[in-house]
Image (cartoon, rainbow, N blue to C red):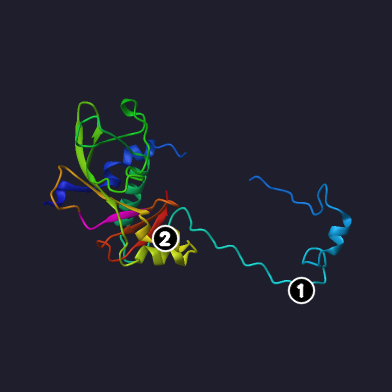
Amino acid sequence: MSSSSRRSLSSRLRDRARKAAVPAMLLSITIGGVGVSATAHAAEGPSCFSAPAQTCPAPAPAPAPLPPRGDQPAGISNQQWRGAASAAEFWSREGVSNIQGDRFHLVAPGERGYPGQGWPGNITQGARAWYHFDTGTSRVREHHYIYYGGLFRDGRHVIQGLEERHHVTPNNADGSQDIYREYDVHAWNHAQTGIRGRERIVRNTRNGHVYATFDHYGSFHYLGRW
């Protein structure tokens, strides 16, 4: 496969990305409500709030949430990082319809009356196929193909370790819970057979965290939240 047949989504979708739309209540609690006698309150022991002299442990600090976008790691080129981010933007706003029969067709938000749902296969864990989309004008239109790979098991628990490091609970980070979906980064001029490239993105469906791999699952880097 020549390098001319593969292009990063960042170059194919630059115009579409420019057009993409960027889309607590405090509860007061009082002590001693209606119907509770003063005697009942007097029987309660002192607390950190009712007795200022009481020695109380400092509250545990809340874990810092992951930022909406990750920092480009060393050793990853600008082109690779932008390509992965462009792929995440692409998948986050695309919808899927069956208007062409067995081959699923990716449709942009509003195209032919189909709203973009974002992250196809987010619920259907086994969905996987070559999808195609078009760019260009009505006179000069280019067809592109990209693969959505379906469920990612995280068998070596690499992403799980990264998630738990940021205080994501094991239940929401364990790949055996069927919570990760993978998506390709590169689009092609025609559907391939067994050739998809080594760069992918993987998304946690429970919190929207997206990780990028540039060495075919050897390592993962936090890309952002979508």
Q: Does residue 2 appear to the left or right of 163 in the view shown?
A: left
- Residue 2, x across and y down, in percent: 11, 51
Q: Is residue 109 above or below residue 154?
A: above
| Mark 2 burial class by Cα count in 10 Å: few <14, some 14-19, many 20+ | many
Instruction: Provide residue 198's location: percent of width, then percent of height.
Output: 22, 58
Residue 103 position, x and y percent, is 20, 37
Q: CA distance from mark 2 to mark 1?
A: 37 Å
Q: Hey, which quadrant is residue 61 in on the image?
A: bottom right
Magenta residues (range) = 197-203
**Could you say where residue 205 lies in the image, as x and y percent from the top left?**
40, 50
Front-most of residues 37 and 117: 37
Q: Identify the residue under disc 2.
A: 173
Q: Which mark is residue 55?
A: 1
Q: Quadrant of residue 122?
A: top left
Residue drawn at point x = 65 percent, y = 45 percent? 25
Q: Say left or right for 187 vs 51.
A: left
Work out whether 140 lies above or below 46: above
Residue furthest out toward the left: 1
Relative to 53, is 87 above or below? above
Residue type at numbered disc 2? Ala
How many numbered callouts?
2
Residue positioned most to the bottom: 55
The amino acid beneath tag 1 is Thr
Is tag 2's residue or tag 1's residue first in the polypeptide sequence? 1
